[in-house]
Amino acid sequence: MPRLDPGIRSVPAGFRMDRRIKSGDDDIKCGNWGRQEMFLIRCPWCGERDVSDFSYGGEAHIARPTDSETMSDSAWAEFVFLRSNPKGVHAERWNHQAGCRRWFNILRNTATDDILAVYKMGESPPEVTANLPATPSGEAAIGSGNDAAKILGPDETGGATAGK
Amino acid sequence: MQRYGILSLIREGLRGHTGWEPAWRFPEPKPRYDAIIIGGGGHGLATAYYLAKEHGLTDIAVIEKGWIGGGNAGRNTTIIRSNYLYDESAAIYDHALQLWKNLGRELDFNIMMSHRGVLNLAHDEGEMRQLKRRVEANRLNGVDAEWLEPEDVKAFCPPISIAPTLRYPVLGATLQRSGGTNRHDAVVWGYARAADALGVDIIQQCEVTNILSEGGAVTGIETTKGPIATPKVASVTAGHTSVIAAMLGLKLPIESHPLQAMVSEPIKPVMPCVVMSSAVHVYVSQSDKGELVIGAGIDPHLSYTQRGSFDIVEHQMAAMVELLPFTSRLRFMRQWGGIVDVCPDASPVISKTRIKGFYVNGGWGTGGWKATPGSGHVFADLIANDEPNAIAAPFALERFVSGALVAEHGAAAVAH
Ligand SMILES: Cc1cc2nc3c(=O)[nH]c(=O)nc-3n(C[C@H](O)[C@H](O)[C@H](O)COP(=O)(O)OP(=O)(O)OC[C@H]3O[C@@H](n4cnc5c(N)ncnc54)[C@H](O)[C@@H]3O)c2cc1C
Ligand SMILES: [Zn+2]
């Protein structure tokens, strides 16, 4: 059993992850490409718009420290610079800049760009399930070309890349 | 290692090319190595090569989840220059540039290194002042840099219009004559072949799924081909750096973004050099096959999807036609994306960590190709000696605590 993507640990508590591996599903390989061609975000106030309408506001739920005068430099570094950057579910802020100009949060699977939930500022992330790659840095079924080909050793033959 | 050259070519030509040896082996992983490098991109293979060649560490392996050079090494636009503003950056990028000059000969592999020159255009007064300042800073650091007035820009690169009526007039440009481009696959293959010849095991299609530690020190890794014991693990995984660090519970100042590039249909030679414009936001060069190679900006959001959004492509085409109107009828053949590891100060992380025996080289973001030999060279030194040398030291993780950032954002023009 591959273990869960380590990034998941850093997503705020309150929702659960299921690992349902989809690579190999035929419908993903041939049928669903059209769905992936545009990156659409559903603004909670205006509805679905293209990503170019929005601006990205970074990882969500990072609270500004209240004890800023007494904090250590490394605690500051953590707040200002360190990010969870998971390959998996990420809670993040967006602003509908070319629309209502309001902020909101989304949960997105960064391995596939699937948007799993949209929720308002101040709310906690809802429970979601996501299709994660089978291994921590494995590739998603859609959108990546990095493990699509098998390398043939000098003694192996077969497949489209076999011709020498 | 079989020598490549005119004599071997003639010999093989005469006997029907039956005597070429595979350029590297396909070994199965051993149960233990002295050090393991995760990531078979340019930086990882360079690190392995210098570890073996300069530090005598030959019982080592490079573990690559896909095929070597299938990550950003195989996806980048290969723009090479070293005209960065700050001393720390100039030191590492120029170290790399000096190594590039002789690398093809050293590796006995034609890396198609072309020092065709890199122009950075200035389109307004502010940019002009900033770029002139950069030329002076470069010269103080011994980095080759000149300022060109518009007529000289036109003479050096005829397709650029210097008409003063343009929306983005060209007020001048910096030129680094020693900058240029090379062939990404050849660099990867050259390093792989040379490292393999020194005894390095290059293990492809093997993903590192966990890093094991005991009492705060690395003891080994788990992979899709089984566990391997080792006292030293070095991550050189570009876009996946945070994923690897999280295996040891470490958080890094890095976010991963898609970065796209594209090539046009091949045309006759029109671009004699590399041209970069940060105001219009485009960078372009022409490959030896005749394709115009164009790089875009990053998608603003974090993603590992290796494709990028369509609006970025649209923006890129608009910028390209703005700068070079003759390209408006060109057809584009291919577009692709890579995942780049971006640091808040746009400088890399070359560092030890609080886990003994775990080293990180990442955060090169949109511009690490040019650094490949220099990065591998100083990182090998860090792994072998467990202490950074003078070039690597400013890029340690501690800078995010001390505040001594190497803030090249904005200072380095378009970040490639
Ligand atoms: C479109 C684009 C254009 C660019 N243009 C330029 C440019 O013009 N000039 C410039 O200087 N730079 C440029 N860059 C940046 C440059 O490509 C990178 O900074 C540099 O290539 C990164 O180092 P690398 O070659 O080692 O990375 P990669 O080739 O990405 O190597 C990392 C390797 O790690 C492997 N890996 C990841 N996780 C694991 C795991 N768990 N187990 C085993 N292996 C793993 C990956 O498969 C990958 O092969 C560009 C990048 C892109 C995407
Ligand atoms: Zn809205």
Image (cartoon, helix red, strand yellow):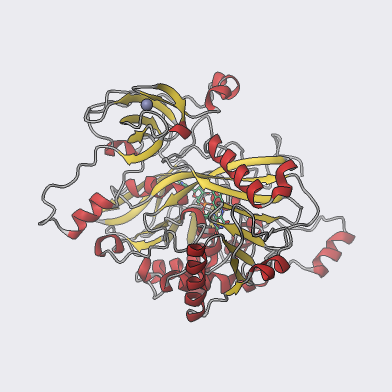
**Spot occupied by residue B251 in the image (x, y as percentages of width and height):** 30, 49
Q: Is residue A74 left or right of residue B338?
A: left
State the image quarter where residue A155 is shown: top right
Looking at the picture, tell me which residue is in the foreground, B19 or A71: A71
Q: Is residue B108 above or below residue B320?
A: below
Q: Is residue A76 left or right of residue B295?
A: left
Which image quadrant: the N terminus of chain A? Answer: top left
What residue is shown at x 61% (from left), y 43% (from top)? B318
| Residue A144 in view | yes
State the image quarter where residue B188 is shown: bottom right
What residue is shown at x 41% (from left), y 61% (from top)? B347
**Spot occupied by residue B22 in the image (x, y as percentages of width and height):** 69, 55
Q: Is residue A42 left or right of residue B168?
A: left
Which image quadrant: the C terminus of chain A? Answer: top right
Q: Is residue B111 above or below residue B41?
A: below
Q: Is residue B142 above or below residue B303?
A: below
Looking at the picture, tell me which residue is in the foreground, B91 or B295: B295
Q: Residue furthest front?
A: B165
| Residue B84 in view | no
What residue is shown at x 60% (from left), y 67% (from top)? B172
**Spot occupied by residue B29 in the image (x, y as percentages of width and height):** 50, 50
**Spot occupied by residue B80 in the image (x, y as percentages of width and height):** 59, 63
Q: Is residue B76 above or below residue B402?
A: above
Looking at the picture, tell me which residue is in the foreground, A39 or B93: A39
